[in-house]
Amino acid sequence: MTSTDTDGGRRATRTRRPGAKILPEHARAHNRALVLQSLFHGGAMSRADLARETALTRVTISDLVSELISDGFVAEQGVREASGPGKPAILVDLARDGHRIVGLDLSGSESFSGAVLTLDGDIVARHDIPVPAEPGGILDAVIGLARHLIADAHAPVLGVGVGTPGVVDDAGVVLAAPGLGWDRLDLGGILTEALGVPVLVANDANAAVLAEHTFGGAGDDIILVKVGRGVGAGLLTGGEPLRGARSAAGEIGHVTVGTDGGPACACGKIGCLEAWLSIPSLSSRIDGGAAADRDGLLRDAGERLGIALAPIVGALDLSEVILSGPSELLDGTLASAAAETVRTRTLATFHDELQVRMTEQGQDIVLRGAAVMVLSGRLGVS
């Protein structure tokens, strides 16, 4: 669910599309999540407000709020200023300072980033470490980084979220991350045992798209393309992550984007999107050419991105494409060329106004997405 600011600082919620029927044994957890979701996006409310917002009875709301206060997730905030006769309502809100979240971003080529975040996704402490030279030392380094951040949280840690390169399944197993030397590594299980707190793991682009949806105001049907040393994408359809049959949805880096040859890719093929668009490849071609060639090279890379995106946008009826990476390369010429290419290769009636834009989350997008993973997994909030 996303939100936008409205009068008085309250944020309006966007209701998710109807999903599977809620079974009786899951109803209480579902109702708890409804209350927390309403407070997360709407701010302080009375119990009567919550009953109206969630369509639950006042008795159910009173019971749930008491339970959530006891669990430390909700706190009373005093009384609302009286505007008429009668007893002023007592306001309750998410206990936003009661817990912290630890986020890890393992997508950097030179350093791993970590942060302590509030439940609102604000970073209150951060720490980076160099990527170990030997793959055998990477896991121990990640555990050490997480322990350092947990010690720096100064509040109970709700959970640890990890965004990592590679293909990751729903159980937190990294099925393949060649750059880190990981193959079927149960990263979630290993970290949970080592840290003693719940750990959720996802592909870095899948984490990033969650941050854009929850904190960046993006819609429910979007693709976020993360460009760095590789190229990957995170997808949302109906406000829900799209993972695919093999947890590999969004692995667009090795889609061939032309029949006219092109750069050789590390995978052995010619003309993969990653060979055109990854930052090392794109920077190398720009640095090796004349200054006048810069716009042409960026336009060409944008067109190749558009070729890869057009069938995805058309098949899934996406409303927006968001780019994450160095804005000096991706914004402007490249983004415009990608948007124009998608428009010319899809049905104009539906996609003529498709927007391709840069994220405003900056370099913290994976860390903030890791926080959303924990909020969703632990509290049912997104």
Image (cartoon, rainbow, N blue to C red):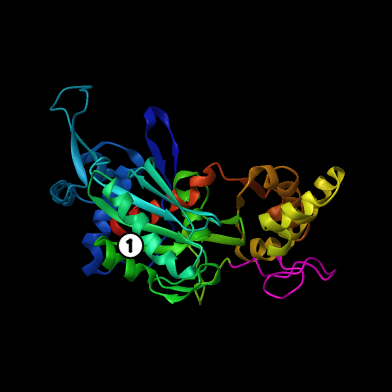
Q: Is residue 259 magenta?
A: yes
Seen at 59% across and 68% down, the residue is 251
Seen at 53% across and 59% down, the residue is 205
Q: Main secondary structure of the magenta part?
A: loop
Q: Which residue is mark 1?
A: 199
Q: Position of residue 370 (x, y in %)?
A: 41, 54
Q: Position of residue 51 (x, y in %)?
A: 24, 45
Q: Is residue 343 visible?
A: no
Give the camera-side residue of 220 and 96. Answer: 96
Report the side of 199 relative to 79 (left or right).
right
Q: Quadrant of residue 229?
A: bottom right
Report the side of 365 relative to 337 (left or right).
left
Up/down of 177 relative to 142, above or below: below
Q: Quadrant of residue 314?
A: bottom right
Q: Is residue 67 magenta?
A: no
Report the side of 159 relative to 3 (left or right).
left
| Extreme residue toward the front, this view | 133
Q: Position of residue 239 (x, y in %)?
A: 47, 57
Determine whether the residue tagged by mark 1 lies in a helix, strand or loop: strand
| Neighbourhood count class around disc 1 (C-alpha, 10 Å): few under 14, some 14–19, many 20 upward | many
Give the camera-side residue of 208 and 17. Answer: 208
The residue segment tinted magenta is: 251-273
Q: Position of residue 59 (x, y in %)?
A: 14, 49
| Amino acid identity at mark 1 | Val
